[in-house]
Image: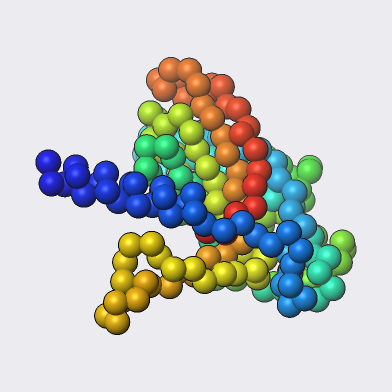
Amino acid sequence: MKILVSLLSLVVTVTCFAMAAPKPSVVQRPQDWTVDVKYEHMQQIMLRPGERDKPMRFWYLILTVTNNTGDDVEFYPQCELMTDTFEIIPAGKGVPQGVFEYIKTRHRSMYPFLEVIDPSGMRILQGKDNTRDIAIIWPDFDMQAKEVSLFIAGFSNETIVVDYPVADDDSDTPEKVFLRKTLELDYTFSGDAAFRANPKMTFGGMNWIMR
């Protein structure tokens, strides 16, 4: 019971904090930048990573990133998938290299220079001629999930520091939390979870948030 109460408290805290989080600036400060991003909707594939392995489901997203900021920028991505069942999965977790190779081949005609996201950093040169197509891949998530949100940070250097509403540091002052401008893509799933291979997936919208 104590574990359940603690978990519920954590959920309430996180939810309240998310609701209170500020939105990105309508007009960016002179030193802030945001690259242009286009995306294809989330897709799934079933692959057998090894000859003896069972087929596994993976989800992926393809982004097209163009830097029209006027300067070359460093892209340090942070990509997470979050379900309404409180599962949070970082991109690339448990994803064999062969999965990207399959995706690259699958989309070769449309994206001949497709790259996989690099969490250690990617330099994006300015101008349309330096546009980059990037794949982000996740392993399968909870089959009972009905809502999924993708959070992708790094497309902007806009940040903000806010007070965490609960935790205090040693001086009894609210702890500071560092938030980044983040792209959020929302999806809703309907139908029987047993038929995940052919789900009814509805796009819920795109937002820029501070997370």
Label total for image:
0
Q: Position of residue 18 (x, y in %)?
A: 47, 52
* Residue closest to the far front: 172
Task: Tell me where residue 133 sits by quadrant.
Answer: bottom right
Q: Is residue 126 above or below residue 41?
A: below
Q: Position of residue 117 (x, y in %)?
A: 60, 59
Task: Tell me where residue 203 sits by quadrant.
Answer: top right
Q: Answer with left or right where residue 178 lies relative to residue 63.
A: left
Q: Is residue 157 above or below residue 195?
A: below
Q: Position of residue 166 (x, y in %)?
A: 33, 62
Residue placed at 29% from the left, 77% from the top?
A: 172
Residue placed at 43% from the left, 54% from the top?
A: 17
Q: Position of residue 73 (x, y in %)?
A: 72, 74
- Judge by depth and name the residue closer to the eye, 112 or 92: 92
Task: Tell me where residue 152 sits by quadrant.
Answer: bottom right
Q: Is residue 39 visible?
A: yes
* Residue closest to the far bottom: 171
Residue placed at 66% from the left, 43% from the top?
A: 206
Q: Answer with left or right where residue 85 lies relative to residue 91.
A: left
Q: Answer with left or right where residue 26 lies relative to residue 202.
A: right
* Residue closest to the far left: 1
Judging from the image, the colouring scheme is rainbow
Q: Is residue 77 visible?
A: no
Can you say which quadrant of the picture contains the N terminus?
top left
- Judge by depth and name the residue closer to the eye, 45 or 144: 144
Q: Is residue 168 above or below residue 94?
A: below
Residue placed at 61% from the left, 34% from the top?
A: 204
